[in-house]
Image (tube, rainbow, N blue to C red):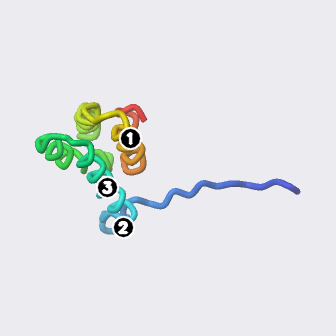
């Protein structure tokens, strides 16, 4: 067809299909998410809980839904401004199931 432009959105993979390691951009986003949470003034126990559930948030696992509910509960403890930033960051690193469960 003439005068037709096709636009494709390419999403780079988050993990190596060979070894499963996170690519640098995914690792950087995960670290950014952790830093945002630290700025939010969460208790040490909440930060530890996030550290525990994060592997099940960023990948599809049998524990993803439960982990997502726990993360959602923790994120609700953040102030409005930090919560908004945290949701934006987590939407870039979370699996589809996690995003759906959290509501983003």
Instruction: Report how many numbered discs are placed on residues in the image.
Output: 3
Contact, CB < 8 Å: mark 3 with mark 2? Answer: no
Where does label 2 land, which residue? 24
- How far is disc 1 from disc 3 in space, using C-alphas? 12 Å
Q: Bin the neighbour count of mark 3 within 10 Å (Cα to Cα): few under 14, some 14-19, many 20 and up.
A: many
Label 1 close to label 2 by CB (< 8 Å): no
Name the spot of residue 61 as percent of width and height, x first.
27, 45
Q: Which residue is mark 1?
A: 87
The foreground one among 74 and 26 is 74
Q: Quadrant of the C terminus?
A: top left
Which sits in the foreground, 18 or 40?
Answer: 40
Q: In what element is the residue under mark 2? A: helix
Residue 34: image x %, image y %?
Answer: 26, 52
What residue is at 30 percent from the left and 34 percent from the top? Answer: 79
Q: Quadrant of the N terminus?
A: bottom right
Q: Earlier in the sequence, mark 1 or mark 3?
A: 3
* Residue at the disc numbered 3: 30
Say whether residue 37 is visible: yes
| Neighbourhood count class around disc 1 (C-alpha, 10 Å): few under 14, some 14–19, many 20 upward | some
- Using residue 95 as the reference point, say whether residue 55 is left or right of it: left
**Callout 2 crowding tier (Cα within 10 Å): few <14, some 14–19, many ≥20:** few
């Amino acid at each position: 067809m003439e005068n037709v432009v096709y636009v494709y959105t390419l999403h780079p993979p988050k993990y190596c299909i060979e070894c499963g390691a996170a690519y640098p951009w995914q690792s950087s986003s995960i670290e950014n998410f952790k830093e945002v949470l630290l700025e939010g003034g969460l208790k040490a126990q909440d930060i530890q809980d996030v550290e525990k559930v994060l592997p099940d948030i960023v990948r599809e696992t049998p524990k993803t839904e439960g982990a997502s509910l726990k993360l959602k509960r923790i994120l609700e403890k953040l102030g409005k401004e930090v919560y908004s930033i945290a949701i934006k960051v987590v939407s870039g690193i979370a699996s589809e199931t996690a995003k759906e469960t959290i509501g983003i």
